[in-house]
Image (cartoon, grey):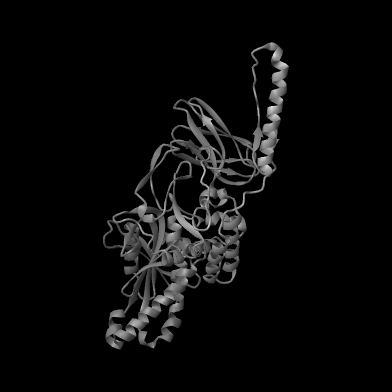
Amino acid sequence: MLFRSANGSRVRWRLSVWPRLFLLRPVAWVLGTLRLRRMEAATLALDTAPEPAVQAGRGELSVAGERLRQGLTGDEQALAARLVDWVERAPDAEVLAMRPFALADRWGAPRTAVLDTFLEAVGAGLVDMQWDIVCPSCRTGSSRVDHLFELGESAHCTYCDIHFDLPLDRAVEAVFRPARALRTVEVGPYCTGGPMRTPHVVAQAPLPADGAAHLGVPTAAGSYRLFVRGGATGTVVVAEGEPAEVTVSFDGTLSPAETRVAPGGTLEVRQAGGVARHCKLENTAWIDQAATAHVLSLNARFRRMFSGEVLGPGRQLSVSRIALLFSDLSGSTALYSRVGDARAFRLVQDHFDLLQSPISAEGGVIVKTIGDAVMAAFPDEPAALRAALAAQAAWPQFAAAHPDGEGVLLKLGVHAGPAYVVTANGALDYFGQTVNLAARLQGAAGEGEIVVVDALARRAEAEGLLGNARVTERFRATLKGLDRPVEAARLAFPG
């Protein structure tokens, strides 16, 4: 007996009965049929039943919603109203671990705006923020903590039975739930292999020790991840005009590493020998929708509102890539002698404001200031370089408005790569060779220049990122603390 839901799962019931006496077979058939009918009716009733009423304190929720709206302006207030309604009315399963980017995509709203609304909602008492520790294999939360300082350097997934490190850009994700004072959310266990636990898995199958698994390919075009238990991954591109059936071989790694297949086709994963494994095809959009700890560390509102969210003492967790900008002012020492401490200090503070604008516009944050220098972090190199170019382009106007700063010019360096995140002076900070190289490149810059590695300069030229700026010199930079010279380039505006 088959029950189909228009928007949900397919349920198939089968009841087998073996009567003790042959003559009772008709009776067993009738009783069995009646039982199946009742089971089908119960399933239909569950599927069509209205959502249970939310036990939320409406007065308290209204107060929290009003506090939230007071902290926001313009379009953010509309998002605030939508979030209040969602927290009040959405089913428990939808609010147990709310993901801001997933809701933003669902609502058709800007991701950063929705994330900022959630952060303000924490301060307003509407929602609580927690951190999911995400397994790299099943991509589900293996555990959850309330604060970053509770993180260790590794974790264990009982579902996959693996230990894994905790890179902040892949394994630690911010999730939100209604504030406990406003709404009690029922936390129920779900089947470990079910779609509620792993919504990003679009197909899965056992891979025999000496045989093949067959995975149905989604009809939606796009890029998917093929994962074989043990850690092997590959890319599956679903696009029109590709073969309907393709085969990928597994011998510890997947070959080919990238496979192209038609929508609705079949992906065969084959191995010869070895051990039986589990393989699955995953929607990478689910991974992309994670508001990771790394993403939040680059959010100015998070750094301002949650300055206490730092790693534990001595803890250092990695990020696979961070873009850094270092700045310095030439002639600042002479400035203090020439105009006095008070006027020089004011100019330095005003120059911080000048840098803040392009840094924020490009999605970056000022990590710290060191005297008259700035260290800022960005999600990628183009953003950091655009901020550096904008700052240099704005400097002549700034200098004209600050006659005390005659002869004071800006020097910048930009670089990106892997780094470690630590807590320093009570805030999240970065250290490692990428940080050292970014600082050294800035040190090699002359007045009004930006120094970057030559590869970034060539990319910027090819992609038209430089605008009116030009590469004035390509050179081999011998930088303190580095074993080898670095191929670098100087960028500057003409005149």
Q: Write down the quadrant of residue 56 in the picture.
A: bottom right
Q: In this view, does 187 lie above or below 396?
A: above
Quarter the N terminus occupies: top right
Farthest residue to the top: give it: 22
Taking the image as shown, residue 120 lies to the left or right of residue 425, namely: right
* Residue in front for this viewpoint, 71 or 291: 71
Taking the image as shown, residue 337 lies to the left or right of residue 110, namely: left
* Residue in front for this viewpoint, 250 or 111: 111
Percent from the top left, x then y, of residue 91? 59, 50
Can residue 418 be spotted in the picture?
no
User: Residue at coordinates 34% horizontally, 49% vertically from top-left?
Assistant: 152
Percent from the top left, x then y, of residue 227? 49, 39
User: Residue at coordinates 43% horizontally, 66% vertically from top-left?
Assistant: 305
Q: Write down the quadrant of residue 309 in the picture.
A: bottom left
Percent from the top left, x then y, of residue 52? 62, 49
Quarter the C terminus occupies: bottom left
Q: How many labels does the image show?
A: 0
* Residue in front for this viewpoint, 445 or 293: 293
User: Residue at coordinates 39% horizontally, 49% vertically from top-left?
Assistant: 166
Q: In this view, does 94 lie above or below 158?
A: below
Q: Is residue 16 above or below residue 389?
A: above
Q: In this view, does 443 lie above or below 433?
A: below
User: Residue at coordinates 64% horizontally, 22% vertically from top-left?
Assistant: 16
* Residue in front for this viewpoint, 336 or 47: 47
Taking the image as shown, residue 224 lies to the left or right of residue 4, namely: left
Q: Write down the quadrant of residue 86 in the picture.
A: bottom right
Percent from the top left, x then y, of residue 437? 33, 61
Taking the image as shown, residue 363 lies to the left or right of residue 376, namely: right
